[in-house]
Amino acid sequence: MNLNSLLTRADIWRGRDTSPQTTPHLSTGHPALDERLGGGWPVGALTEILVDQKGIGELRLLTPALAHLSRAYWQAWIAPPHIPYAPALAAAGIDLQRLVWIRTCGDDQTLWSLEQSLRSGVCGAVLGWPGRADNRALRRLQLAAEHGEASGFLFRPRQEAHQPSPAAVRLELELEHDTRGLTVHILKRRGGWAGQPVVLSAA
């Protein structure tokens, strides 16, 4: 396979490629983050959110977009580490009538559920907490998101930052202990370099 063939593949990320992108985006609800991501969360693609520990406020990143999507689309939450707290989700504007919570037994079932939900064409967003996901599994999920035109969000350990991934966006989150805010390090995004980290307040 020659270089030109490689560069035309959709699963090859070119860090210096700053050409205009045609991939649709969904606003994150955080203007500074939208700017760094080139418009917001990619639609029809995966976003990886890498954290040291669960519960540092990672869902806060997504609630504005999830609330917007829930007006017209279903969303699936697959194998979350804790039972979703319905009153808080409703207070954030998420329509609980359009939210499906899926419990799974093991990594294989989690990955299967993620793939089917992303590919279904009825989910605007799919959130997943896969315990194990190699590059092959992630590629299947990326293709499923493209097919179903869904925004997929995978919450994974921060140590996975050193592993390759076909995800369109990879974020690394760091808790600011003094303010309880989040620092968002953008490790990868389509369309070029992300620049400086984004700091989101706890409010």
Image (cartoon, rainbow, N blue to C red):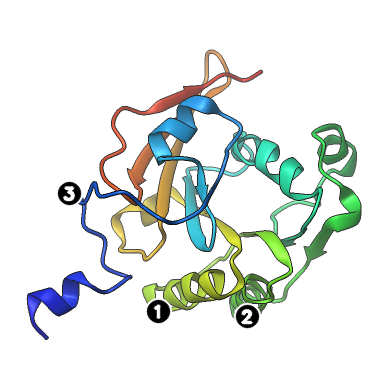
Q: Disc 1 marks which residue?
A: 136
Q: Disc 2 marks which residue?
A: 112
Question: For the point 21% across and 57% down, which residue is it?
Answer: 14
> Mark 1 or mark 3: which is in front?
3
Instruction: Name the kind of residue labelled 2 in the image.
Output: Trp
Instruction: Name the kind of residue labelled 3 in the image.
Output: Arg
Which numbered disc covers residue 16? 3
Residue 128: percent from left, percent from top: 62, 61
In the rendered structure, which disc, 2 or 1, sits on the residue that comes first in sequence?
2
Q: CA distance from mark 1 to mark 3?
A: 25 Å
Note whether residue 78 is visible: no
Question: For the point 58% across and 58% down, which residue is it?
Answer: 151
Residue extending furthest toward the bottom: 1
What count of labels does the image hold?
Answer: 3
* Helix, strand or loop under label 3: loop
Residue 115: percent from left, percent from top: 60, 76
Question: For the point 65% across and 34% down, which residue is it?
Answer: 60
Question: Residue 30 occupies which quadrant of the picture?
Answer: top right
